[in-house]
Amino acid sequence: MTTAEKHDAVASPGRCCIVEAGGSACGREVEASAPLALCTRHLLQAYEHVVGEVGVTDVAPVPCAACGSRLGVHYPSGWLCAVCEWNLGDRPDYDLGAGRVDVVYYIRRGDLIKIGTSSNPRGRLAQLLYDEVLAFERGDRALEQHRHAQFAAHRAGGEWFEVNDELLEHIRVLSAGVGDPWNLHRRWVSERVASGR
């Protein structure tokens, strides 16, 4: 029997189309919900192969030490963070300074919004009285000064600005799809640590 004849013999509707190593047709019944003409055994073999190549995204067994995400990608060799691709189980060495990320922060207290900058926003914000962290934007003092000039018409004093539509729209754009701004900051830090820059 030629290879084409073997394939034709296997390719009957409702039967697994795999030709086994010995040249004989698998011929097992294909489940009605199967996306390919493969029996359960061959679907599972294909799945295991794909998992080894691309991993499986799932809830990680531990939060990422670099960015805090609970979403991971599981490979046969271990877990990677699905957000920043940090090897779960590895500890970032923040003492080397690689985790420094300058941010412009937007916080609200009552009817005022403060636009400030810090390379350590958690430490800086611990020193301030505020009601809510609205957004973070990657940038240093130059970007902060640019934002102060951009919204200067609404300055209430120092780095505090009156709530206004233009500033609220800017914050909305920065926070779109972000959820918690601290998650975004953790991702930036972990990317910085992972890149070594």
Image (cartoon, grey):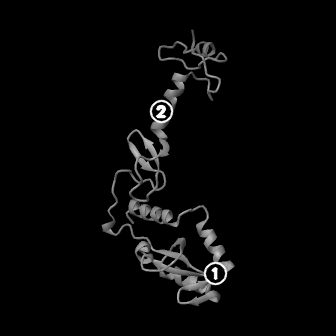
84 on left or right of 196: right
| Residue 168 spot, x, y in % from top left | 64, 75
| Residue 2 spot, x, y in % from top left | 57, 12
Q: Quadrant of the N terminus?
A: top right
Quadrant of the rendered structure where residue 15 is? top right
| Residue 145 spot, x, y in % from top left | 53, 84
Choose between 1 and 39: the one closer to the eye. 39
**Name of the residue lying farthest toward the right:** 165
Q: Amino acid at mark 2?
A: His
**Name of the residue lying farthest toward the top:** 1
Q: Is residue 6 above or below residue 194?
A: above
Dot 2: within a 10 Å radius of its alpha carbon, few (fewer than 14), some, or many (20 or more) residues?
Answer: few
- What label does residue 49 carry, if any? 2
Badge 2 marks a residue whose secondary structure is helix
**Name of the residue lying farthest toward the bottom:** 157
Query: Spatial distance from mark 1 to mark 2, Cα to Cα?
Result: 55 Å
Q: Amino acid at mark 1?
A: Val
The residue at 59%/89% (across/down) is 156
Ranked by sequence position, the earlier of labels 1 and 2 is: 2
Badge 1 marks a residue whose secondary structure is loop
Q: Is residue 171 above or below residue 52?
A: below
| Residue 39 spot, x, y in % from top left | 56, 21
- What label does residue 92 carry, if any? none
Q: Are marks 1 and 2 in contact (CB under 8 Å)?
A: no
Quadrant of the rendered structure where residue 118 is? bottom left
The residue at 47%/33% (across/down) is 49
- What label does residue 163 carry, if any? 1
Q: Quadrant of the C terminus?
A: bottom left
The residue at 67%/17% (across/down) is 13
Choose between 182 and 3: the one closer to the eye. 182
Dot 1: within a 10 Å radius of its alpha carbon, few (fewer than 14), some, or many (20 or more) residues?
Answer: some
